[in-house]
Image: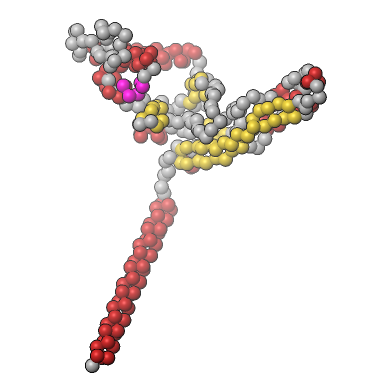
Amino acid sequence: IKKTKLHLDGSLYSEEEITVEVNVAHKKETEILEAIDKTLAPNYCGPCYGAADDEADCCNHCDDVLDKYKMKKWNLYAIKMVAEQCIREGKTKPSKMKKGQGCNIAGHMTFNRVNGNFHIAMGEGVERNGQHIHTFIPDDVKNFNASHIINELKFGPDYSYDLALPSTSEPTTLEGVKKIVTNDNGVSGMFQYFIKIVPTTYKGKNVVKTVEPDYALFGGTEPQVETNRYFTTERFTPLIMDIDDEHWKLGEMVANKFNQNHNTNANAEKREEEKKKKEEEKKKKEEEKKKK
């Protein structure tokens, strides 16, 4: 998977812009580490938390610890939360988002033929208690805009460009889908696409002849091409909504209606109890009268 930074207008960051940004960030971090080092003892040797190759190895900075853990293929998030170096450098908190930046995500992945999901979300992806979650600063939600354009999404081999098949123009495809989040529809939000992948076989010599020109040599067997098609449904959930007076009054009306219903039910129960009490008293008097 490759991520490329984008400007707010969708244009790519140039190599010069990326270089400048990296250099500025590196200089800032170097200054922070130098200031921290001055507060440490002259003979300070930070622990590597079991990941050191030699007893004499020192991990004086958070990145030193994380590098050791990467080499061991151990849990980076777990050690990052407790390592004294990371706590001292303030790296246990989620990174703050940069407003006005986007990214282009491209690549491929392999997955099993079972139910699952892949997602693009704000924050840092971590493993906690056996679950994959994203940590972020709550105040950053307003800076996360889920607007997106899906340029291409395919599952399995695709021959549509060679065979002029209609798969790239079918209404069920997500290619070319454009979703824009604005202040009117939620400021920020979550888009969910539920995808059903269907194995598909194209048959016939007119379909596969460009893929296998020698199909006639296979002794009369019907030529075919196996790939996948998919069908989708979608859902959008706003993460932030501005409540105006109209929505507030509607909420009050619902609450008042609930209270009225609650009071009505309570009064009905009270009347029913009084009725039962009167019937019991009447029955008791009749029994006493019979005894006399």
For the residue pair 42 and 270, the one nearer the viewer reads as 270
Whole-percent x and y of residue 139?
35, 34
Q: Residue at 38% of width from left, 30% of height from top?
A: 130
Outermost residue toward the bottom in this view: 292
Which portion, as a residue range, is magenta?
A: 75-79
Q: Is residue 86 left or right of residue 99?
A: left
Q: Describe residue 83's horizontal placement relative to residue 7 as left or right.
A: left
| Depth order, front residue of 269/245 | 269
2 up-or-down from 120: above or below: above
Q: Quadrant of residue 165?
A: top right
188 falls in the magenta region: no
Q: Is residue 96 left or right of residue 148?
A: left
Residue ID at (24%, 90%): 291
Main secondary-structure element of the magenta-colored stretch: helix
Which sits in the foreground, 4 or 224? 224
Query: In the picture, residue 155 is in which quadrant?
Result: top right
